[in-house]
Image (spheres, helix red, strand yellow):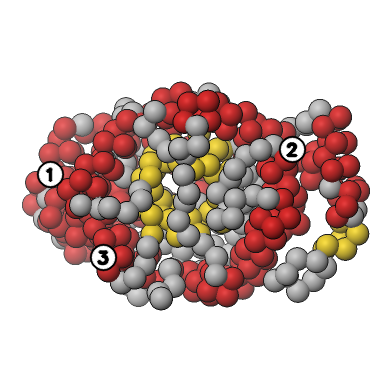
Amino acid sequence: MKLTKYSFGIGDRFARQGKAQLQAFVEAAELGLEITPVWNKSHREHTTIHSTPATVREEADAAVAALGWSKPYLVDADHINADNLHDFLEPSDFFTLDVADAIGQPSAPARVDQFVRSQGSLLGRLTIPGIDRRIEVSESFLRQVAEQYLFAVEQAAAIYRAIKAVKGDACVVEVSMDETASPQQPAELFFILAAVAEAGIPAQTIAPKFSGRFNKGVDYVGDPAAFELEFEEDTAVVREAVKRFDLPANLKLSVHSGSDKFSIYPAMRRVMQEFDSGIHLKTAGTTWLEECAGLAAAGGDGLAMAGEIYRQAYRRREELARPYATVIDIDESALPDPRQVADWDGPTYVAHLRHDPSEPRFNSGFRQLLHVGYKVAAEMGDRYLEALEQNREVIGAGVRENILERHIKPLFPLA
């Protein structure tokens, strides 16, 4: 199974917006952009909502049938590990192997020695086309990379073998190392990919940790110029690793929590055009946020429910934020009082929530708190799902616009 040059991971917490999401890709195709939609939902999200991986496959298949989509589409077992793989095996065909927790754990000394020997021909100054500097490769550096990352790659290989035993070659594999404290430098990424190749993992996407903060549902926090250089060098590294290590020719970078990173989309677009490279962008829960915005915009009972969700999320903000502490940054002093929100009309609620950089009322903390507050809606059960059905047209329009206008058009190079 071969992943196309451009692919886009779309989350849908409550599995009700599949058709609206896919409509954005239909319209992108009409513009000449072939982008593979990849429905993704993590074990954590399934646990919170009490859903199963099979429901993601059902949603994707239903949307494809309804819209007559004849191009590729995939279902991602998002951020899986050996402990939670089983339930994802049958319905999924894209597997994000999350081995960040294994980074830094020691591999067997003999295995480290073997890796250092296997890469000995690259000792000295390594030249990578597209990087305007030579990279010094010493034996101590190779050993440092092996000691830091080799065990994680071995864990990824073990998970992959379990997947292959069931799926054969009918799957796409991503190695994910983004949810860790420190970014991987381009030289480290190069030798991580060497280890991936040695382990026999046919990775088609690699998700490194980039510098800066990729908070959920809001813009990049960091130096955009520094990110641009890092993204360019990582792209060059991937291209060179494919040539040197016989990795899949379509291997590409994967950017997690890539939703709403408006300030770095131009740089990513430029690099993709310069290198003729692909990308896998994985969005966060922006579809769920569009549901909140759509309920508020609908007014009446929808607006009341949107206010209730915020009121409960505000009261439980410490509990809801705790699992996402590394990927959100909420200034509690800037959060509106729920009593104030109760007096808002629909346009005011939407202005505070929807990520529009030109809107002075946009409140990043309000958006991030609601982002992690999907548990509140899940606990509403059928009452929330019925509200989605009653307001499906206004919500669907927002979901489609969010994916197409705020993400696809600014990021992907048009022919």
Distance from Cα at disc 1 to Cα at disc 2:
48 Å
Query: Looking at the image, which is closer to me, 81 or 179?
Result: 81
The residue under the point 18% across, 39% down is 384
Tell me the residue that label 1 is attached to: 389
The residue under the point 85% across, 36% down is 114
State the image quarter where residue 131 is shown. bottom right
The residue under the point 45% across, 60% down is 6
Question: Is residue 263 rendered to the left or right of residue 210?
Answer: left
Q: Considering only vertical position in the picture, is 328 above or below 377?
A: below
Tell me the residue that label 3 is attached to: 27
Q: Earlier in the sequence, mark 1 or mark 2?
A: 2
State the image quarter where residue 348 is shown. bottom left
Q: Whole-percent x and y of residue 80?
A: 50, 33
Q: Whole-percent x and y of residue 168?
A: 50, 32
Distance from Cα at disc 2 to Cα at disc 3:
42 Å
Residue type (three-letter) at the residue carrying disc 1: Glu
Residue count near mark 1 (Cα–Cα under 10 Å), binned few <14, some 14–19, many ≥20? few
Q: Secondary structure at mark 2?
A: helix
Q: Earlier in the sequence, mark 3 or mark 1?
A: 3
Q: Secondary structure at mark 1?
A: helix
Residue count near mark 3 (Cα–Cα under 10 Å), binned few <14, some 14–19, many ≥20? few
Residue type (three-letter) at the residue carrying disc 3: Glu
Tell me the residue that label 2 is attached to: 150
Query: Looking at the image, which is closer to me, 184 or 76?
Result: 76
